[in-house]
Amino acid sequence: MGRKDTIRLEVHEKGSSETTSDLSRGGVAEISDALRPLLADVFALYVKAKNFHWHMSGRHFRDYHLLLDEHAEQIFAMTDDIAERARKIGGTTLRSIGDISRHQRLKDNNEESVSPKEMLTELRADNQQLTRSLRATHEVCEKHNDVATASLIENWIDETERRTWFLSEVVSDL
């Protein structure tokens, strides 16, 4: 039995399904460990965008309400891809809301009242932080030659920078 077979057997014996990935066991662990907090941050940003979408008020309500809903949909679309990528390579991912809260780096906003400018400014900063996290995760993927995950991340960086740009333009006008 070769080294790859041993790795696949060990992964299979721990309850994970076999994978077609040729990444090393250490690479799978390191990439999965980077994807887990990334996924938690994406969930946290999704919930925050929806929170602000639901609680938006003011003279630009409709525009901001629709913008935040569009952003939330785009953010939520990332979640399944991130989790499935970890599973495809033989790793594990988040399992619960508690797991999300243990791994997230972006801060929640539980304030009763937040002005539209504060909402949009906070979302801009969170998207900027998410971009930095995406770049760091991309570096981990490059280190292990995981081009598939790196390719997905490149698209998410572009989407996140676009959200940041839109939010920056709106905030600069407030």
Image (spheres, grey):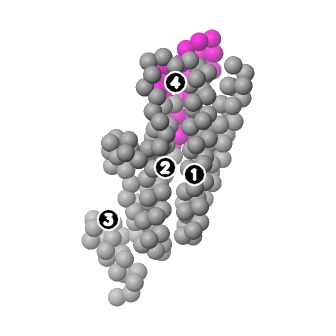
Residue 16, label in figure? 3
- The residue sitting at 42% across, 72% down in the picture is 25
Q: Residues within 10 Å of mark 1 (few under 14, many from 20)?
A: many
Q: Which residues are magenta?
A: 50-77
| Residue 151 place in picture, x, y as percent | 60, 59
- The residue sitting at 55% across, 63% down in the picture is 141
Q: Could you say which quadrant of the image residue 66 lies in?
A: top right
Residue located beneath label 4 in the image? 53
Q: Report whether 21 appears left or right of 119.
A: left
Q: Does the magenta stretch mainly form a helix, a strand or a loop?
A: helix
Q: Are marks 3 and 1 in contact (CB under 8 Å)?
A: no
Q: Are marks 1 and 2 in contact (CB under 8 Å)?
A: yes
Q: Is residue 135 positioned above or below 114 on the image?
A: below
**Which quarter of the rendered picture does the C terminus lie within?**
top right
Q: Measure how far apart labels 4 and 3 are at the Cα level.
A: 38 Å
Residue 38, label in figure? 2
